[in-house]
Amino acid sequence: MIHAPTPATLVPPQRRRFTVAGVVQGVGFRPFVYRVASELGLSGFVGNDSASVFIEVQGTPTAVGEFGDRLLREAPPLAVISDMSWTELPAHHLQDNDFRIVSSRDEGNAPTPIPPDIAVCADCEAELFDPADRRYRHPFVTCTNCGPRFTIIRGLPYDRPKTTMADFGMCDRCSAEYHDPGDRRFHAQPIACPDCGPKLWFSGGDVRIDEVDAAFAAAQHALADGSIVGIKGIGGYHLACAPDNHRAVSALRQRKARHSKPFAVLVRDLEVARRYAEVSAADAAVLSSPARPVVLLRRRSDAPAAAAEVAPGNPLIGLMLPYSPIHHLLLAQVPGSQTAAPQAIVLTSANRSDEPICYTEDDAAKRMPKLADVVLDHNRPIHVPCDDSVVRVVSEGGEVRELPIRRSRGYVPLPVDLGRYGPPMLAVGGELKNTFCLSDGRRAYCSAHIGDMGTVATLKAFTHSVRQLCGMRGQPTRLAADLHPRYVTRNWAEHNAGDRPLDLIQHHHAHVVSLLAEHEMLGSPIIGVAFDGTGYGCDETVWGGEILRLGGDSHRFTRVGHLAEVPMAGGDVAVRNPWRMALATLWHARVPWTAEMAPVQAATAAELLLLRTQFASGRGCVPTSSMGRLFDAVASLLGVRQHIDYEGQAAIELEVLAASASDEAATIPLRMNVGGNGIMDPAPMVAAIVTALRDGADSAGLALAFHYAVAMAVSEVVCQVAGNTRIVGLTGGVFQNVLLLRTCRQLLEGAGFTVLTHRIVPPNDGGLALGQAAISTLTALERCDQDDAQSGRITGCA
Ligand SMILES: [Zn+2]
Ligand SMILES: [Zn+2]
Ligand SMILES: [Zn+2]
């Protein structure tokens, strides 16, 4: 039979140049392009420049068209394509049948996003435990689909010489894999094997063990023995100990100067996780995701006894699954070793209290001896420190969302698209849980978790991180900081701005705009409900229970509602002692203090006398509309907690108490008073709680009724002030409370609103910098229109 000539031989070839932007470097994108082009019989090439992946293909028009479709449809799992464009080119006459991967070009364009660090993939994990594989038990096994990225990249474009792997010359076998487009390790920059890769060792006292199996056996033995083991990981050093060893856990608390704040536990697998906590299918999916965050889960009542000491008094427990080959090896039986491998270990950042995580060799030499008894160390340098991320999982109506609590390893530095081009700028964030945000004008890169800015060490780490990121991304021409005159970050910005404009941004305004920015909805009118502990208000009082209206210009707001102010006596002392806020709230509600009340019992007679005088005279008191403080006050009244050891402790316990209430208990009616001025007054609710307690009401039921009362008040104020606005945002640290978040959402959606909540940056102050960056960008753009882009100022307050 004679075939007719195929159309391909009649139609002239077509040549097209594609430019693909987004997270497309370090994620196996070029091998993927190579494979698709080869399958379609196309010639041409693919390469990286600092801003994108560029591709030229030549072949039949059908194949070229199909190629473009498949790029979008079949991109590798870790790739995020933000933009793809193409132009037609004249076809080359000399048809070569080859498709090639060409070397990277540094063109000085806006650099491409750097991928985050990704947990060991299933293929690499299988190799790690396959005795026949040449990477059997190799602590640095990695491929194009997994492994460290952000923490080892020193510069762009992302190529091995610009990573901390530069000093490890590839052996012939690794090099062959690296250069073979058909191999899973094609252009995997951190590629390594036992012959050429980094080395791991165990050290303790005078002992140093360089052999891998012996080193792991020694570490396991030390853990079993109750020692604290330092472990160098992906984004820094961790401290580990046996979770069921009381002595070890309390020694760890002492060395870290961390009294009762919970520790995370690394568990071998989901089966072990289920022994410690209630793990839903949604939780399991997030635990196993490539980002491998710490997931806060409901602790099981029959969890191993140890779990209570790891998170004392805390009904939640943070669990995580192994994400580096070192974790996998540490939790697996070492062949021939007498010591049984642990199934779970406490794993916490190596630092004291809220200081930055220890990550360099020099720093480790100074700090680790005071923190760890022995260390499992290695010589692959960490360039950028990165703590573990923490999330909660919210599932409602069949939808599962991650609610970020700390956004760091596995997520950073994926950018948020601000959707418009402004000046490159630096937003320095807040004071607690600090992160900063650097934008190249359009894409906003949020930093990893830096910490609480109260120490010199944290400030140094902040300065270092800012310089590092600016070095890679370019210098900002504008700065933004919180309005609070005593924030270290604001002072830093004022000292470092030079002649660059500096915008001072109100705290809750930044919270609301961070929510708009992460939803790519800047410029959409919104009613923002911003509830947190503390934020400096435009009237110089302490805000924190705010309802703000933003119109089409997101860089302006009006305060349309707030929690009624109560007197806060003694600043920080009031924050650490919820009973003081309870007494303040009772005072505000004109409910007399009586001896049977939990907050009264927590105070001495002298303290009661002093507070009474202060509240009566107003001396030493600052009015506060903080919702976080109201949660503290109610937690105290219900006898949940009188003193806190870490931020949000009382509120977390109140939430969990409420979640344990039976449905009948929830019928106790509590209501806040909502005035026509948008002010939510807790007075009648507080009086009702006191009466209910006297009548012997169940505290869990009251805790639940309190959550409903707050949600009802929110819904009432929002309906009152919304006008034509149909979008409501829930933001601020108080909305880490999943019960409150869900109840508010239900009521507001029931009233016909679209509700935005956080999915990318945390609702707490860790998300503040993104909002600051967006507001400052919009302010700058407006000033440009007005030909007055020079000076920053307090922006937004109305
Ligand atoms: Zn892999
Ligand atoms: Zn090798
Ligand atoms: Zn805040």
Image (cartoon, rainbow, N blue to C red):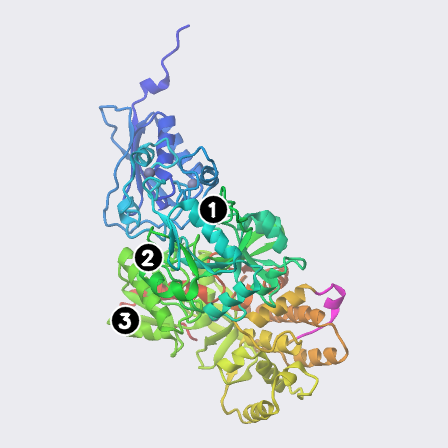
Q: Which residues are magenta?
A: 661-671
Spot occupied by residue 647 in the image (x, y as percentages of width and height):
52, 71
Tag 2 or tag 1, which sits nearer the N-term?
1
Spot occupied by residue 31 in the image (x, y as percentages of width and height):
36, 35
Tag 3 or tag 1, which sits nearer the N-term?
1
Spot occupied by residue 707 in the image (x, y as percentages of width and height):
64, 69
* Quadrant including the C terminus: bottom left
Determine the quadrant in which ligand 2 lies: top left
Looking at the image, residue 704 lies above or below residue 441: below
**Which residue corresponds to mark 3?**
496
CB of residue at label 2: within 8 Å of ligand 3? no
Callouts 1 and 2 close, C-beta under 8 Å: no
Q: Does the rendering let one see residue 521?
A: no
Element at label 3: helix
Callouts 2 and 3 close, C-beta under 8 Å: no
Left/right placement of residue 740 relative to residue 126 reads: right
Q: Is residue 668 magenta?
A: yes
**Which residue corresponds to mark 2?**
421
Q: Quadrant of residue 102?
A: top left
Q: Residue at x 23, y 46 (%)?
A: 106
Mark 2: amino acid: Tyr
Tag 3 or tag 2, which sits nearer the N-term?
2
Left/right placement of residue 309 relative to residue 233 reads: right
Mark 1: amino acid: Leu
The number of discs equals 3
